[in-house]
Amino acid sequence: MDIYHLFLVVIFGSIGLGYFVYGARQSSPGFRLTGVALMIYPYFFDSAWTLLAIGLGLLFLPRFIDL
């Protein structure tokens, strides 16, 4: 595990927690599920580029898909 991987895990995990809290307060399942996904997905990928690509995709997911 390199420093970039660790940095991305912390950043996307923190943003995921923020999405989850926002979704819980607004009763938005889209933001809640995206928050959980942002906190969990780094455990399954080792490449920093993969983490960055998937993380950015998940960040914009609730903006375009309304559940």
Image (cartoon, grey):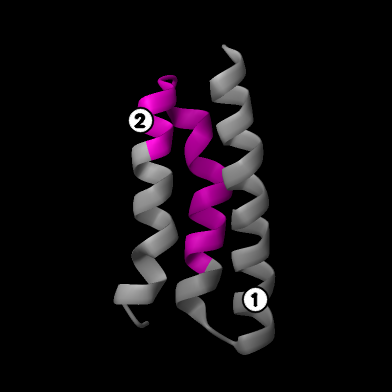
Above or below: residue 14 compared with residue 27 = above
Q: Percent x, y for residue 65?
A: 30, 76
Badge 1: residue crowd in 10 Å (few <14, some 14–19, many ≥20): some
Q: Horizontally, is 59 left or right of 5 in the view?
A: left
Residue 60 lies in the magenta stretch: no
> Residue at point 45% right, 75% down?
30
Residue nearer the viewer, 42 or 51: 51
Residue 64: image quadrant is bottom left
SS category of the residue bearing label 2: helix
Q: Percent x, y for residue 6?
A: 62, 24
Q: Percent x, y for residue 13?
A: 63, 46
User: For the stretch drawn in magenta, what is the main secondary structure?
Assistant: helix
Instruction: Look at the image and tell me in which quarter the C terminus lies.
Output: bottom left
Residue that badge 1 annotates = 22
Residue that badge 2 annotates = 50
Above or below: residue 46 compared with residue 9 = above
- The residue type indicated by label 1 comes to Tyr
Q: What stretch is highlighted in magenta?
A: 33-52
> Residue at point 53% right, 31% down?
43
Above or below: residue 59 compared with residue 28 = above
